[in-house]
Amino acid sequence: MRGLDKKLLDFIKKEKMVFFLILLFSFLIRIFKLNEIPAELWGDVNEHIIYAKNILKSNFYWGFFGGDGPLFDYLVALFFLFFGKNFLIIKISTVFVGILVIYFAYLIAKKINNNNKLTIYLVPFLMSTSFWLISFSRQAKPYILVLLFVELFIYSYLNKRFFLSGLILGLGLFVQSSFWGMTIFSLLHWKIFLPFLPFFILIFRNQIYPDILLSESSYLGEKIGHNLSFLDKTKNFFGNVFDNFQSIFLKGDIVFRHNIPGRPILDIVSSIFFIIGLIFFFKETLTNKKKLKINLFLFLVFICSQFSSFLDIANSQNSPSFGRMIGAAFFIYYLCSLGMFYFYKKISFVLKDSFFSKLFLFSLLFFIFFKNFYDYFYIYPENLPNKNIPFGKIITDDIKKELNFDKNKNIIIYGCCWGEWGQPEPKSISNYLEDKVIINYFDFFDQDKLCNFIKNKRETILIYTSNKATIYCLKDHNINFLKNNFYQKIFIN
């Protein structure tokens, strides 16, 4: 009996060690070149930084910014409180969430497949190396928090913690509108419904009823196609369902911010295992009564977590949307791990050699890691604006360097957005400087105001602007031009 206890203890220690290594591996990938990819601040992230800063000033809010809820900003505010208020810290906050996603994926895999030890390791490993999840773990956006709430709900529900499940569903409504499809699970049990109901009433009264059901022009309301016929709505809805499904292994999201345009969620090898896993999943569901209930539950989560994406029936160009699909990630990688497990069993039987079958499995996993790693860290940055050259960061780094020599210089930003996709944005420059530097900003059409400002100042002035901009009044001043390949810096003594 003591020998059996020792073997069990040794196995538990080994399992924990293997998972710890996977978690560490996941963390290292997510912080690798974190300050460099993505390098530049942009619109939505700027707004979340501003909201988080306002929260720290006690300006609390519970509204939505587009489809993004307030909960993410409260998390970011917590990180800002302890670590600083900048782009890197908001990315670290989503890295933190991304690591929790891996942790709960492991717990769920262990709960639903405790007899299949290989799958318990494969699910968190595949999610650790996923281009999709690496990208959203570094995006400084709330989408990765949606996946965490989906996983928290799955885990609490499987453990029959119904009241906690209801709280998670309710709070999840305030993460991002892509979570709203999970509402249906509040009907599974009255203990889930009761804690969920107050959150739903609040979101319905303040967001769904005026913003979606009544408005034809709001960010959310315009997506459900008020002016479309029932036939067109139905056709577009099922078109979105098809687009989302095929984007897993064929043609993906065209948005460059979080994806290589058109790249599917899965690499070619993982796609094959996903299809194998899907076949075995349905076979297991139909033939194993013990698995029927849990498999139907997981499949329903897969569908409902994408429901908000399906409902964007007025904008076919927005489908598929990897951000609004992210709640389905656990199910997708669970199927990949099932496919890989059954394939490994077959290979082990054919080869009849444990070493070669393990070597083959290791080779597959290495290819999956290398493909996703290479795509994200070497191909993806080339598709970002100006090939990931951060105009705003480079300018603000120069401003900080100048102010180290002379803090009395007047800093002027003249115009904006001369790079690809509108960079550098004025808010990006302000957020990079963390509100520690006063910036005098003038639009390109405000040249008269700029000239009056220059005329009335006696201190040294530094102007940062496009290398194509001209300022007519500078001929009256003692100036020194320093040009860069994408901006010019002008000294006025």
Image (cartoon, rainbow, N blue to C red):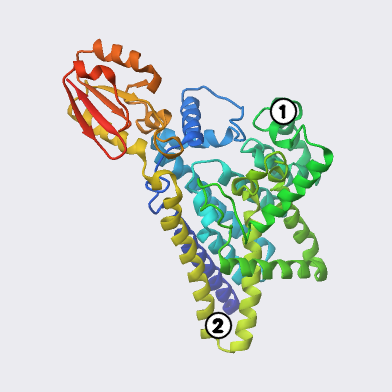
Return the residue nearer the eye: 440 or 22. 440
For the image, the number of numbered tags is 2
Q: Which of marks 2 and 1 is in front?
A: 1
Q: Which residue lies furthest to the bottom in this view?
A: 352
Q: Looking at the image, is 300 positioned above or below residue 87?
A: below
Amino acid type at mark 2: Ser
| Percent position of residue 253, x then y | 59, 51
Identify the residue at image location x=76%, y=46%: 237
Kindly tell me whether residue 105 is visible in this rendering: yes
Return the residue nearer the eye: 390 or 330. 390
| Percent position of residue 203, x then y | 70, 30
Identify the residue at image location x=77%, y=66%: 282
Q: Quadrant of residue 294?
A: bottom right
Q: Quadrant of residue 245?
A: bottom right
Amino acid type at mark 1: Glu
| Percent position of residue 109, x then y | 64, 62
**Badge 1 is on which residue?**
216
**Badge 2 is on which residue?**
357
For label 1, the crowd category at 10 Å Cα-Cα, with few meaning under 14, some 14 to 19 and many 20 or more, is: some
Q: In the rendered view, does 350 fall on the left or right side of 95? A: right
Label 2 sits on a secondary structure element that is helix
Could you tell me which quadrant the C terminus lies in?
top left
Q: In the rendered view, does 313 fall on the left or right side of 19? A: right
Return the residue nearer the eye: 3 or 224. 224
Label 1 sits on a secondary structure element that is loop
Identify the residue at image location x=60%, y=32%: 66
